[in-house]
Image (cartoon, coloured by chain):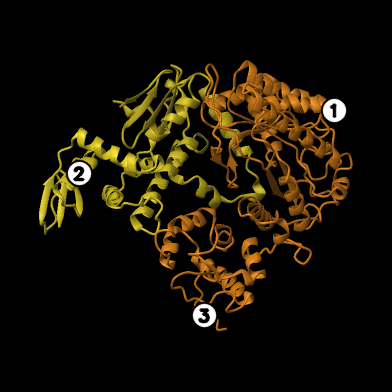
Chain colours: A orange, B yellow
């Protein structure tokens, strides 16, 4: 069994790794007598690969055979690729033995589509059902729901999985049709709706009696590929914002397109994955979820794409200088949160500490506020730096981006100071 | 300068607080019993650790502080960093001297520093929870060596006993030469006489369970296969996974 299993594991990990979702958060569950494991609500990473991404769950495919031929996917049927399929027992045993050694938080099960969506989904459900019921595995399980799968199977999956997800992959339907003619958005949104229904129904049932079964307690997530098609950041972020409005949607992931099938002429030829853009999209996503921003404040018709040079919060502040400077000692929490250089944690520290004394810039610095950025947008007791409304957004932008260029290497020829 | 000498235990530190209020003199420095005095000493006092006194101080703290803040003090103590005891002393003194709670006054340097120190230890606790790697021994005990910077291993026991309730395990701090053994019922502290059992962090192959080597190979193979070559970013990897942890990581051995 040994060599064969190692081979399968490698092949099916290679096929699964382009799915970026990694979270193991959202469910807190204590251990059960006779069971293995628990889950921690905040999620635990167990390792980090050389690309800096975390390994939290055993991210693996049940099989990488697939009937579809999606242009962006490494497992498309026209690719000449090593193919493999796990037997249910093999995967169950791997999960448990890895878990016992503290390698992983649980299983993230995905699969290529064989025969029909329902046929595939049924086999996936069998794995997680066996894990939960026969082996009493109590760790985290994230399962992909196959687009086009029936409501009944989605429902069964939700009884065993902590999180379910269906990937949108391409933000607009028209482009999806171009790259994956066999798919449409309906086949994605339908299972999403099934999951949402399951979550809401279960919550209602559990409000009546505690013993009602939980359904995907960690909700659902999805992923969009960035840079394979011509969508603007506005289209992407408006899609995300609409998804976050749904009750069970916890995370939208963005995956910078990696040219896995560079021969396909429908795809752009990229030298490098759009990693900066991906990063800016995540920052914008954070603004939506934790900084009380509305999506049309981040992108609009005038600025359909995020600024790659500066982060979206700074970009918003520079577009709206009339909101600044913010008085650290008086302003509301929500306004302090909007100052570039102040994060959620420091904003909370500020609001708590200012009840004792007036805060000075030295205090802010010690608390971990990035004064380099924040100084242009705040006033506190003594600060006398030119702020954004005294000077101009252009000036602040120049100063802040200039510094980045100088960082690291000293420039012996440098004399200039910026006068304005 | 006022100097207190004490036995460098947490109970000793709390006793020192008690004695200081009793004597109405407060130490500028806290030294170990055998540490030499600095040049100019105005007053010197040797604290005799007393369980009753320390309990009374702790109870007083529990009355004045949130549960979470009391935990922070414990965490800061476990950092074992130089000066952390003096910081805790000042923090306790400020707590007792102020009518209003000082807990959220982060403009006060001691309050902020205590929080930061506790965070550091908590961060390491979290790292241990992530990075402990068990190796299954022939007698079915799962064994993991660790060497944390702070004494944070005891803080992880709740997590590990709940998660791995149905397997026997040992987690051993090789730096402080002590560890904990879980026998399916309770956790007991233990010290190994012979630490040569795991040269370079790996269990001796004769002691490994039959399938242990296989699973280590599988894990290594999986770990390697997960890397996306187009995105290699070693700096980011090291940021999350500092090199000092690598020696006990199966996938990095």
Label 2, on which residue?
B16
Q: Is residue A89 visible?
A: yes
Point out the residue furthest to the front here. B99
Q: Position of residue A96 (x, y in %)?
A: 58, 23
Residue picked out by circle 3: A413
Are the numbered discs 3 and 1 placed on the same chain, yes or no? yes
Q: Nearer the viewer, residue A394 or A257?
A: A394
Quarter holding the N terminus of chain A is: top right
Q: Residue sitting at 85 percent across and 28 percent down?
A: A116
Q: Horizontal and vertical percent for residue A81?
A: 77, 36
Name the subunit of mark 3. A
Q: Quarter of the image holding residue A94? A: top right
Q: Mark on residue A116?
A: 1
Indicate the secondary structure of the residue bearing disc 1: loop
C-alpha gap between disc 2 and disc 3:
59 Å
Helix, strand or loop for disc 3: loop
């Amino acid at each position: 069994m040994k060599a064969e299993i190692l081979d399968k594991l490698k092949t099916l990990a290679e096929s699964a790794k382009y799915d970026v979702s990694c979270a193991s958060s959202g469910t807190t569950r204590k251990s059960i007598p006779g069971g293995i494991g628990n889950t921690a609500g905040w999620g635990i990473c167990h390792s980090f690969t050389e690309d800096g991404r975390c390994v939290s769950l055993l991210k693996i495919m049940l099989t990488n055979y697939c009937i579809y031929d999606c242009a962006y996917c490494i497992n498309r049927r026209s690719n000449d690729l090593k193919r493999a399929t796990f037997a249910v027992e093999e995967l169950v045993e791997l999960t448990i033995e890895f878990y016992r050694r503290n390698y992983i938080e649980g299983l993230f099960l995905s699969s290529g589509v064989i025969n029909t969506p329902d046929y595939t989904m049924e086999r996936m459900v069998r794995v997680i059902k066996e894990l939960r019921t026969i082996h009493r595995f109590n760790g985290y399980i994230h399962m992909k729901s196959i687009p086009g799968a029936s409501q009944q199977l989605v429902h069964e999956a939700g009884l065993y999985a902590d999180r379910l997800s269906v990937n949108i992959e391409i933000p607009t339907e028209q482009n999806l049709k171009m790259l994956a003619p066999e798919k449409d958005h309906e086949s994605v949104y339908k299972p999403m709706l099934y999951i949402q229904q399951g979550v809401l129904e279960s919550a209602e049932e559990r409000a009546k009696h505690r013993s009602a079964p939980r359904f995907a307690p960690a909700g659902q997530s999805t992923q969009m590929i960035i840079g394979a098609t011509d969508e603007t950041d506005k289209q992407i972020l408006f899609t995300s914002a609409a998804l976050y409005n749904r009750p069970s949607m916890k995370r939208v992931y963005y995956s910078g397109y990696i040219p896995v099938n560079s021969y396909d002429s429908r795809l752009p030829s990229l030298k490098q994955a759009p990693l900066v853009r991906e990063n800016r999209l995540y920052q914008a996503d954070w603004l939506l979820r934790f900084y009380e921003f509305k999506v049309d404040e981040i992108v609009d018709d005038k600025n359909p794409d995020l600024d790659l040079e500066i982060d979206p919060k700074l970009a918003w502040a520079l577009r709206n200088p009339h909101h600044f400077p913010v008085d650290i000692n008086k302003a509301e929490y929500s306004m302090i949160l909007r100052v570039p250089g102040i994060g959620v944690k420091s904003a909370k520290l500020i609001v708590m500490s200012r009840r004792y004394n007036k805060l000075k810039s030295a205090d802010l610095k010690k608390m971990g506020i990035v004064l380099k950025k924040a100084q242009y947008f705040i006033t506190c007791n003594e600060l006398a730096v030119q702020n954004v409304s005294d000077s101009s957004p252009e000036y602040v932008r120049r100063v802040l981006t200039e510094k980045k260029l100088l960082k690291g290497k000293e420039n012996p020829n440098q004399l200039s100071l910026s006068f304005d | 300068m006022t100097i207190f000498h004490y036995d460098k235990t947490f109970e000793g530190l709390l006793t020192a607080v008690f004695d200081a209020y009793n004597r109405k003199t407060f130490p500028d420095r806290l030294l170990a019993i055998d540490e030499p005095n600095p040049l100019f000493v105005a007053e010197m006092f040797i604290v005799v650790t007393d369980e009753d006194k320390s309990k009374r101080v702790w109870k007083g703290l529990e009355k004045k502080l949130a549960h979470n803040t009391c935990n922070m003090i414990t965490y800061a103590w476990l950092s074992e960093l130089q000066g952390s005891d003096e910081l805790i002393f000042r923090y306790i003194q400020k707590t007792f001297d102020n009518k209003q709670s000082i807990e959220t006054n982060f403009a006060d340097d001691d309050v902020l520093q205590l929080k930061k120190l506790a965070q550091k230890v908590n961060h390491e606790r979290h790292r241990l929870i992530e990075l402990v790697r068990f190796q299954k021994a022939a007698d079915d005990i799962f064994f993991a060596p660790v060497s944390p910077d702070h004494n944070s291993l005891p803080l992880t026991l709740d997590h590990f006993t709940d998660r791995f309730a149905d397997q026997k395990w040992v987690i051993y701090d090789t730096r402080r030469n002590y560890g904990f053994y879980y026998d399916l019922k309770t956790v007991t502290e233990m010290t190994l006489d012979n630490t040569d059992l795991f040269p370079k962090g790996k269990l001796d192959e004769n002691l490994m369970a039959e399938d242990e080597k296989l699973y280590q190979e599988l894990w290594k193979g999986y770990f390697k296969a997960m890397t996306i070559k187009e995105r290699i970013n070693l700096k980011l990897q090291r940021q999350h996974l500092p090199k000092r942890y690598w020696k006990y990581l199966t996938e990095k051995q």
